[in-house]
Amino acid sequence: MIFSDFGMDTASLAGSLETKLAAVRQAGFSQVMISANDIVGHPSGIAAGVHAVRASGLRVTGLEALRDYEGLAGQLHAYKVDIAKSMLDVCRQLGGGTLLVEASASTHAETDPEALARDLRKLALLAIPMGVRIAFKGVPWSRTARDFRAAGDIVFRAGCPNLGLSIDAFDVLAAKVSQDDLDAIDPEQVFLVQLSDFMWQEMRSAEEETSTATHFRVFPGEGAHSEELASFVTKLDAIGYIGDFSFDVYNDDYLQIPPEAVGGRARRAAEWLAETVLRRALPVPDTDRLRRSARG
Amino acid sequence: MTNPMDREAVAEPLNPLGFDGIEFIEFATSKPQALGEVLERMGFRPIARHRSREVELYRQGSMNIIVNAQPADVPRTVQPVERPILSAFAVRVRSAESAFRRALDLGAWDIPVRALAMELNIPAIHGVGESLIYFVDRYEDFSIYDIDFRAIPNVDPNPPAVGGLHFFGLVQYVGADRTADWVEFYSQIFGFAPLPDTVRFGIMPKGLLLQSPCRNFYLQLIEPDDTARYAPADEHLQRIGFGTPDVLGTVALLEKRGVEFLASEKVRSSERGALTKPCLGSVMFELVHDDSDATLARR
């Protein structure tokens, strides 16, 4: 069975970094999204955290997350650039890959699209010598980009080859963003897709959306929106998205059960998506290359 | 206020930094004498030593090469090992300070100041791999070497170039699918422009060419072969390209000095270019047919 397109997120799991990585491997995944604090908070230091990840043999989907970066001025901007540089350096030590950047929720952030694009362009340029790609994600509580359409506009305006989008299914489902809007997205510009669901039919308030997003997400197939999630993933496949799917399941309950149990749930989600929804069960050698050339 | 004469948006000038060629290219090695012998065979002469560091200056014609054996004191820079590594290049600009500030604003990584008392603080940013890129604006009336270096006694400080050799370009190895990223880096920070695939120099056909805004220096970006695409990305400056108006004549002169050139089915010296056999593990030089030598003409 192959579900190499899918990966887990260390934020879904309890325990030490090593325990989390072992659970991800045991569940059969070959890639993992790393929460920055799992590396920098490693009891034996950053180098030990980086070593644990590299020794696990898992491919790093990306490092998360730089927040409240764009739209700041003066000293605040300089401070955030410094934070960004530290995170890029951790990313480099992990072997490059992708840094996830969530659209700013800071009340100090200005919203002039040109200024936002300039800041993201700077971040992308900082990332080039480090071999890192920047995946910018709109979030519903942001002041600068509330969804993938707004984030896509800023990314397009910035126009950097290593700057792209991360699209989070949760935000699309919760805010009821039309999936037809995905037609306007250039699949090459999507660097990462994050997948999760939630248990209630709809969000009653912005507060409920925020608290659900940070505490009560569930794996695809476990929640109340399996059909929409399936059509979201199918739609991405149809527009030509060939990148990774990462389960960004932040759930307080999952942090109180054994990581192996959470890994099992993730595995069921990947099987459901790979074999039932996408029928991606059979691997083809060098699939990326074939898909690219098929698209011309 | 709108000027009625403005009919169109005027873009940033094509040469925002006043880019004016290459001041020096640096190797790092823990065996500077071994590299010195290789450079001397290529026509370079040692002409000065740094006042406080284990650094030597070699020169021929318009070209300066720095051989740096000083242990690295800044993270993410080349630690000298036996095998020489291309560790830096310095670009000539109108104002080093403003070019450096502009680069930082755009998103370059600076390195900490390392100059000692009475030494020049030459601003630098991180380039590919562990290499650095310096900004130099003192190269006409007096040079950076006048201050930081002591001349080696009884040595001609301006040895002539063998066969009109001059800096032509640098070859940079980049990771798979990374060409576009590096094009962005060099065009944003320095104003380099990619050339169409139909423009080719020398005998090594691969990769994408970037032309400097002063139009007499080139960067060639080369991605890994198919078989190496999935190996961990190793990005670095790989070799220096020298321009010469007469490749085969210069090859003959250099062969007399003991330089060996590759002569295989795929790569052999021709009017277009030539490639030296690798020395000391990795050092090779490329010759490229090029009539222009603006830097030489100015001296």
Image (tube, coloured by chain):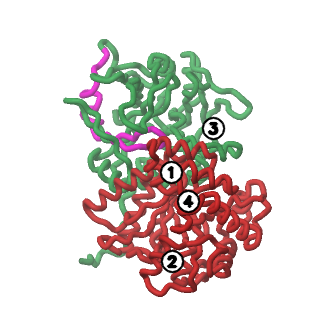
Chain colours: A red, B green
Q: Chain of mark 2?
A: A
* Relative to A89, residue B281 above or below: above
Q: Are marks 2 and 3 in contact (CB under 8 Å)?
A: no
Query: Earlier along the polypeptide chain: callout 3 or callout 1?
Result: 1
Same chain for labels 4 and 2? Say yes or no: yes
Q: Which residue is mark 3?
A: B203
**What's the CA distance linking mark 1 and mark 2?**
27 Å
- Point out residue A76 in the picture as x, y percentages from the top left corner: 28, 62
In the rendered image, is residue B279 in sight?
yes
Q: Is residue B132 in the magenta section?
A: yes
Query: Earlier along the polypeptide chain: callout 4 or callout 2?
Result: 4
Q: Are marks 1 and 4 in contact (CB under 8 Å)?
A: no
Q: Which residue is mark 4?
A: A13
Residue B182, disc: 1
What type is the residue that disc 4 sits on?
Leu
Give the number of the mark in front: 1 or 2: 2
In magenta, the rendered stretch is B124-152
Residue sitting at 47 percent across and 79 percent down? A209
Quarter of the image for residue B148 reads top left
A216 relative position to B12: left or right: right
Q: Which residue is mark 2?
A: A149
Quarter of the image for residue B69 reads top left
**What's the CA distance linking mark 2 and mark 3?**
47 Å
What type is the residue that disc 1 sits on?
Trp
Residue sitting at 46 percent across and 33 percent down? B166
What type is the residue that disc 3 sits on?
Ile
Secondary structure of the residue carrying tag 1 is helix
Same chain for labels 1 and 4? Say yes or no: no
Residue sitting at 39 percent across and 41 percent down? B133
Secondary structure of the residue carrying tag 4 is loop
